[in-house]
Amino acid sequence: MAPGAAVGYDPLMRSPPLACAVLAALLAACAAPSAFRCPAQGGPPWRELSTDHLVLRTDLPAREASALAGRLERMRVAVGAALFEGAPPAPGQVEVIAFRTAEEYRPFAPEGAAGYYLRYAGGPPRIVLSGALQPWQRALLAHELTHHFLASVFHRQPRWLAEGLAVYMESLGDDAPGSAAVTVGAPPPARLDRARTRPVPVRELLAWDGGPGLRPALDYYAASWVLVHWLAHRRPAAFAELQRRLAAGAEPAAAWRAALPEHDPDVPGALEALDDVLAEYVRAPIETQRRMVEVPIAVGYFERPVPPAEIHAIRLVLWQHGPDKGRAALEREVAEALGEDAAHPIALQFRAALDGTDPAPLARAAVAAHPDDPRAWTFLATALPSPDDAAAREAAYRRAAELAPRNAAAVHNLAAELLAQGRSGEALPHARRAVKLAPWSPPVLAAYAAVLSDLGQCAAALAAQRRAMEALPERASAESRAELAAGLGAYKAQCRTGLRAAGGAP
């Protein structure tokens, strides 16, 4: 995604608008989805349970929904408490969609995924799963919630540290409802076995960026966990210093050398000696010390029903994450949504894409019917691509940001529009706020870097672009990595040019 590209706003998904390539994929297949009935057709009701930090939307029965909300909130508290003493809370709300049955869930999930986590597009992260949480699913949630916290604390995150800490927190999945505490620190057997049988040299691990490596990603995960475990249990002071420097934005290699000078990669044999230390560490009985983390026994929340049109909107914004379902199925879903609400902004956006018609009239109809819905204003902005519409487009993005000030995508879109108009000074506070709201989002970070670069702040732009690259998911496309790398190269060249102009060394 280009640094100045808009990120589509939706309070459920916060994903990019339906692109032509994605739409083509949706229409290409012919498999029919499993039967679904919304409440208006006799299906189970959907409810929304909200806390200060979580929003759960589900068709689970009331008691099961309440139990799930409580378990998710306990895990969120446990992760934050286990990671950092007095760390600031992660920004925003984590959004959870829990389908009542696996049959309802599968049409909207990647093959083989019993739960997945979306946290890269441009807004608060989102968890999608079937309602019953198995222990391994809880471990997955603890892992991903750890990433949620890390992104808000560390200005720089080498991949090995991010994944090592996330694996370290997986033991929080052993949560027993009704207990006032959970434990953290138990070695995960599968990770430990892999670390013993498929070790990764530390030099290779420190260079891992999450892209395709020399070995399977699971090997890097296990090796990352071993290094974090060894640091936490054998070198806690050095580990704390390393984290302090990374939280302050230090370059990872420099932070490593400062915290662990005896393992300086530039000293011949230093990292190889650490390889030997870690190999002996995993062969010996691993420290199983656990510490207790207090969590709330009960959680308060606000509950309200989810309107039928919004249930269809949930399904539509998740559509592309599941198997191909064919044009007919998508047509039916859109028609049912519009049957519930003829001007629903998400349904109309899909309607325009399906028909290949001018979306502007539909977007104006959505705004007229839902003037307080930021999704309608974002739809209108994206429906006005002409340079002649710049003022109207800006006004629409600005209204969306006013209606959704805590949504990073809405704030980012306004910053991107101002940057595209050559008004980077005005874009800066919005781009900065978007990063504070979604420090885990590569497009948000990249847009912030672009604004800084346009203002001549090449060093700050470099730092933001590096954070964007570090935030890329492992499965990010080669094109995405190349695009961010090209931006990094451009900012480096900008800094060199500025240094020469100032009379410094080339």
Image (cartoon, helix red, strand yellow):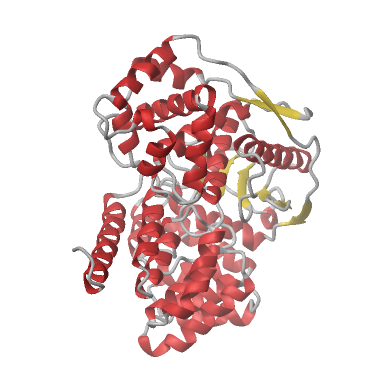
Relative horizontal placement of residue 69, taking residue 331 as reference (left or right): right
Compared to 274, does 151 lie above or below?
below
User: Residue at the spot x=57%, y=41% of the render?
Assistant: 145
Residue 404 vs residue 493, the one in the foreground: 493
User: Residue at the spot x=45%, y=65% of the render?
Assistant: 7
Q: Position of residue 156 (x, y in %)?
A: 44, 48
User: Residue at the spot x=53%, y=70% of the render?
Assistant: 411
Relative horizontal placement of residue 355, taking residue 126 as reference (left or right): left
Residue 134 visible here:
no
Relative horizontal placement of residue 500, taking residue 393 as reference (left or right): left
Q: Position of residue 185 (x, y in %)?
A: 59, 24
Tell me where residue 176 sits by quadrant.
top right
Q: Quadrant of the N terminus?
A: bottom left
Please, which residue is most extreme toward the bottom here? 388
Residue 98 visible here:
yes
Q: Position of residue 335 (x, y in %)?
A: 54, 65
Compared to 186, does 261 lie above or below?
below
Q: Quadrant of the C terminus?
A: bottom left
Compared to 37, does 255 lie above or below?
above
Residue 66 vs residue 498, the one in the foreground: 498
